[in-house]
Image: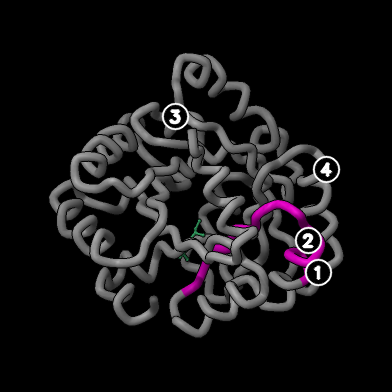
Amino acid sequence: MNTILEHIKTSREKGDKLLAILLDPDKLLISEVEETITKINQSKVDYIFVGGSTVSIGITEVLVKKIKTLTHIPIIIFPGDFEQVTNKANALLFLSLLSGRNPEYLIGQQIKSVRKLKKTSLEIIPTGYILIDGGVETSVQKVSNTTPISQLNIEEITMTAIAGELMGKQLIYLEAGSGATEAVSQEIIKEVSDNLTIPLLVGGGIRTKKQLKNAYKNGADIVIIGTAFEENNSILEAII
Ligand code: 1GP
């Protein structure tokens, strides 16, 4: 069976770049889902990520079920907490916030999710999540109560990513935070990518075709776009 992780790895080997759109259940109204997914279906989107830092209990599953009736694009849960785990999706980014020093987001939430995960057939993808200063205080920072790594500290970002790979993570996600005013710099993407053998995800503050192209050029395998699409769901036509 071709798993999502295998697809990501194969794409990396072939140099195919992937795009994910992030939908936040707390922001997207159910009445808007159909139009939103129609736009996504018309574009070259590889994955739909669903998740947010502060999502009311139960609504992630409702949203995922609705999306599934409208598309064949794989849905990947990108959870802000264990309550967002639902077996209605195709896969779960099993995140560990490696940049932070808050045990709750390194291992606590993961433990809380185990009972549910044991009962699901979700593909679980161990992912090292690295929060980088995106110029504004983001929800991830507030909710996780952790300090992002400065964009100037490329050494620490790179060593954190490598440590993640050595710990067995299958993906590394460089995150400037939703709505970041400064996306992860090209220099950071390049340095981290050059030092990893696993796929690299980059998100936070990406709004333009130029940013997207540069992120891919410097080694991002998957770029995640949330806010720019939320604000204008016709943006994909312009930037892909
Ligand atoms: C946030 O990386 C994602 O977790 C997407 O960020 O909303 O800024 O596109 P934006």
**Position above or below: 209 against 45:** below
SS for callout 4: helix
Determine whether label 1 and label 3 are within 8 Å by CB.
no
From the viewer's perspective, is the residue at label 3 or at label 4 nearer? 4
Q: How far apart are marks 2 and 3 (CA)?
A: 29 Å
SS for callout 2: helix
Amino acid on which the number 1 mark rests in the picture: Ile
**Position above or below: 112 against 151:** above
Determine if residue 4 is in view: yes
Tag count: 4
Q: Which residue is drawn at 84% across and 61% down?
A: 156
Q: Distance between the residues labelled 3 and 4?
A: 28 Å
The residue pinned by badge 1 equals: 154
* Residue 130 within the segment the image draws in magenta: no
Q: Distance between the residues labelled 4 and 2?
A: 14 Å
The residue pinned by badge 4 equals: 166
* Residue 200 within the segment the image draws in magenta: yes
Amino acid on which the number 4 mark rests in the picture: Leu
Q: How far apart are marks 1 and 2 (CA)?
A: 5 Å
The residue pinned by badge 2 equals: 157
Q: Quadrant of the C terminus?
A: bottom left
The residue pinned by badge 3 equals: 83
Tell me the magenta residue range: 191-206
